[in-house]
Structure formats: C-alpha cells, structure tokens
Amino acid sequence: MQSGRGPIPTLTTLAMLLSVAAFALAEEKTEMLFHAGVGQRSSLMDIEKILAKRYPDLELNFSFKGSGYFIADIERSKEGDLYMPGEEFYLLQALERGYADPYDPVKDSPAYFMTVIITPKGNPAKITKIADFARPGVKVSLGNPQACAIGIWHEKTFKKAGIFEQVQKNQVHSAKCIAEVATAVQQKVADASIIWATTAVLYLKDIDIIPIEPQYRGFVSLPVATLTTSKHPEMARKIKEFILSSEAKEIFRSHAYVIDPGPLDKDSFCAGDGKATEEDCKWLVEAVKVARDDSIPVNVKTCGHLVGEVKRQRKTTRAGD
Amino acid sequence: MNEEVLSNKLSATERERIAHSSLRLWPVACVTAACAVLAGYLALVGSNAIYLGWSDALSFLPRTRLWVRFWLTVRTSALATCFSLLVGIPAGYALSRFRFPCRTLLATLIDLPVMVPAAAVGVFLFGVVKSFPVRQVTELLGVRFAHNANGIVLVQFAVTVAFCARLMKASFDAVNPRFEQVSRSLGASLPGTLLRVTFPLAKNGIVASAIVVWARAAAEWEGLMLFVGGTMAKTDVMPFSVYLDWNGGMMGWVVTFSLVCVALAVTSMAAARLIGGRSYVW
C-alpha cells in the first residue's frame, strides 16, 4: 500500500457520509423556514398542525430562538420565509436592514402580550396590586432592561406608579429572560414579579396570577412579517394571512394572548376601564384554581379559553406537553 | 503568633509528630473532598429525580417525544464523531510522531477550539458556510447547512474535532515508537505499520477517545442555538430541548431530558474508562 493513496479512501468516505446526511434531508416538499421567538412555540405548533392539513406539500420548519439572536442569523444565513419575534423592536431592525417585507404595525399583529402580577403559590407576601411591590421586605425579581423586553416593562410600570426606586431596593434577582423571572417566582426566590400572561399560564400549578389594575396593565403587540429572503413568497404570504385570521387568533387566545386589548395610551398601557380584557384576566385566575384541583372538571365553563393549557398541566405533576 | 518563635519552642520529636500527623491528614482530606464532590453530584441528580417524581417519570420516559430527540442526538453526534475521527486520527498521529516546522504553533492552534466558547464557533460557522470555497462545494454536492440536521452535525464536528485530535495524540503517545521503528526496519510500509502495529496498540485509547468525543458532541448546545435554531423534533437535540422546554415552562420535560442527558454522559464515560483501560488519555 502506497502512502500517497491515503486521501482517496478518506475523501470517498467523507463524500459518502455527506451524501447520507443529504439524503436524509432530500427535498420533496415545499420547505420553508419560520424564524420565531421561543415564547411563541406552543401557539405556532398548534398553527402548524392546521397548516399541515391544509397544505400537505408544505414542510414548515421553525427556528426557535431568543429574540435577540434573530437579526444575526438572518443576516448571516440569508435564509427564512417568515419572522415572528417576541418584540416589534427586532422586526423593525429587520425592516431597516431590508430583510423584512413592508409591515403594518396595527394590521400585522394577531395578538398582544398582557402584563400580569405573579407570586409563588399561596401568595406569601399578600400582593394584590402594583403599589404592594414597594412595601418593605417584599422580594422582587426584575428583568434586565438591556436583555429582555419584560425588564423594560418592569421599569415602565413602576415608574408610572412612582415607586421604581423603592421597588429597586426590594429587588433580589435580576433576570436575562422572562423564563428566568418566572422560575425565580416559581422557586420562591422572589415574592412577586410582572410577566406576560402567556408566560404565566405555563406555570399554573406553581404560581398565582393576579391581574394588574387597568391603568398599569401593559400590552405589547406580537408582530409577524414575511422575509425578503423567502424562496416561496406566495406561500409565505398565505401563511401570514392564516396567522392573522380569526381561526389563528383563537389559537393565540387559548395560550393566554389577548386579541383585543381595548384603547391604549401612548405608552401602550390600558387607556380605558380595562373592560376589554376583564374576561381574559378572570379566566387566568380561574385556570390556576382548576389546574390545582382535580375535583373541578376542565371545560369551557370552568376555565374558558384556557381549557387546553389546564388540561395539559393537569396530566402530570410537573408540566409536560 | 510568629511561626518562627513557635517552631523554636517545639522540640524535634514534637515537630516530627506534627509532620506525621499532617501527612496522615492529607489522604483523609483528599478522600473527603472527593466524597464531597460525589455527594454534590448525587444531590443534584437525586433532588431533580425527586422533583420529577416516580409517576411523572413513568409518564414521560416512554413518550415518543423523548425518544425522537434521544435518537436524533445519538445519530447526529455519531455522524459528527465519524467526521472528527477522520480528521482527528491523522492529525493526532502527526502531532504525536512527526517533527515539522511550526509544530508548536499548530499544536497550540489545534487546541484553540477546546478553549473558544462553542457560541463563538457557531458564529464562525456562519461565515465559513457562506464563503468561498465551502459554499461552492456544498452547492455542488447539494448539501445545505444551517437550519437542519446537517447543521447540527457541522456544529458538533466543529466543536469536537480539535478535542478529538488532542485525545488521539494522547492515545498515540501511549504507544512506544520503537515498535513502529522495528516494523519499518523489517520492511513494512508506513501505512502497513500503522494498520498492523500502531492502531492495534492504540486501539483502546482510540475507542475510548471516540466515546468521549461522542459524549461531548451529544452535549453541545450553544453553537446550535446560534447556527441551527430549534425545529421541533428535527434539530432540537436533547440539550437544546432542555432550553426550549425551560422557556415553555415544561419543567417535567426539562428535568426528564436533563436526567437522560446525565445518564448518557455517565454511561459513555464509564464505557470509555472500561475500554480505555491502560491508555493514559485521562
């Protein structure tokens, strides 16, 4: 055997292994890529099931990440058909750099995030309103405004209530993402915090949900846009249309997003009496009770539009899917 | 109190007694420290297992959702290990046996990806796959990277290849070069010597190293987060599922996946130790 023949078998094996990998992903369907915030996963998975039935040739792949990672990904990979970050800020960045198709901030949003107060199970610090966060001795978890959108809302909300400095003194935990805030409260590291209702509803067995007074109740729209890098722009447009349809909006609602927040002020706080979201708040509180009490039947009468979430969490002691 | 003054006050026998007793203390201290580390690990795993509970474990463990991700992890990391071995074995052998210009520089460079954060490797991969000549070659072969299983293999390969070369170097270092010299002097070619002398002698080290490389590939996550992203049941290997499900509040799945990851790591390290036997990779 000559030493000069060495690279040939190596290259052949490499080519064979590469073809095996390529074969595994042979393209037969319309393959599309949807960049989406990790928080939207459960809603988008439900939507994917409907789309799979409607378009059997469609293979919709999701790239779920923290919202902060998207722009770099799209910029470097130049891949993707649709984009749904958890915050409009990231979509505006994509728009500015020419990666997103024109987007209408009002029409192109199927749902809104709504802020709620969360406390550990049993509400040990007896928190009932925003002012309670300033009470001495209350342990508060706050998000870092540089790292996550909920951190910005913590600052906005407590500044509006005029208690930001006192709340900062009560801060025991600084989080880089919303899941960290929720886990801090779930693990009783903190007595209270504010998170989106759609995140709070994931922890029905371990945290109490308290609706915020209408004047401090914040709303953030969940935007969706098609991308200029799309290889199937027509299909991308159809998917976007479906996401904005009333059928898809109901799916978002079943995961505790708000469809109609009512009138909002310039800072996106509730501008009215909060009637528009009263029902959403009521079912959140009810869902907590039903998820923990096996004697209460799970149906629309007991937990409204959150039936699916309650059923999922009642299946096991620790939440699965 | 000043130590010098103290030592002057002590007699020679007393000093000897103290030295002996401190000598006896060392093994005890070391064993205690090792036990403390072990107890810490057991407490971590045990507390999570208790948190999950028996009924939930029975509910989660048989589910397809877990096993789809388990086999995806096993498959991709096995493929990545094959690629790493293709590069790592010759590289490790060259570093162990040959003297060539800039050898130290190359040895240092090959170590770099072991120290560079996996996230940075993920970022660099974006640049590599989108530039000449990788882009042209992959297009010619019809292989796409980024948001698919190929992307996972590429990240795992990029993170483990240097590590693999390092372990292979250690495996070849354990083989006495005199056996090779004797084989060559008896007329065997270099490839013949490699196949009949070096590889059989280094076999245990190579197999054990391959298992460790596989375990490292199976644990990779940061690079995947940046380069691949999580597509349900397609690119969310187990460490990635831990992150995604943690964000989804699915603590049952988070703990289940974590425990399976730990079980995989422990099993592979135990296998590597048993097979590795007398090689001095560790």
Image (spheres, helix red, strand yellow):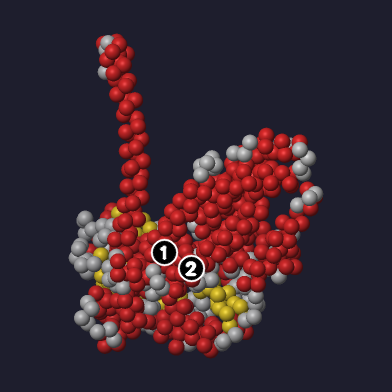
Q: Secondary structure at mark 1?
A: helix
Decide if residue B196 is on the left or right side of residue B160.
Answer: right
A168 up-or-down from B57: above or below:
above
x then y, percent, for residue B177 = 67, 36
Q: Are marks 2 and 1 on the same chain?
A: yes
User: Label 2 amino acid?
Assistant: Arg
Of residues A81 and A131, the one drawn nearer to the viewer in this rendering: A81
- Residue A271 visible, this angle: no
x then y, percent, for residue B265 = 46, 55
Q: Secondary structure at mark 2?
A: helix
Of residues A30 and A92, the one drawn nearer to the viewer in this rendering: A30
Badge 2, how many Cα within 10 Å: few under 14, some, many 20+? many
User: Label 1 amino acid?
Assistant: Phe
Residue B69's disc is: 2
Q: Residue at x 70, y 61 (%)?
A: A13
Of residues B272 and B94, the one drawn nearer to the viewer in this rendering: B272
What residue is shown with label 1? Answer: B257
Q: Chain of mark 1?
A: B
Q: Residue at x 31, y 16 (%)?
A: B16
Q: Residue at x 52, y 46 (%)?
A: B276
Q: Residue at x 30, y 54 (%)?
A: A172
Disc count in the image?
A: 2
Which corner quadrant of the image does residue B119 belong to? bottom right
Mark 2–mark 1 contact, CB under 8 Å?
yes
Decide if residue A255 is on the left or right side of residue A287.
Answer: right
Residue A282's disc is: none
Decide if residue A293 is on the left or right side of residue A258.
Answer: left
x then y, percent, for residue A182 = 34, 64
Cα–Cα gap, marks 2 and 1: 9 Å
Q: Chain of mark 2?
A: B
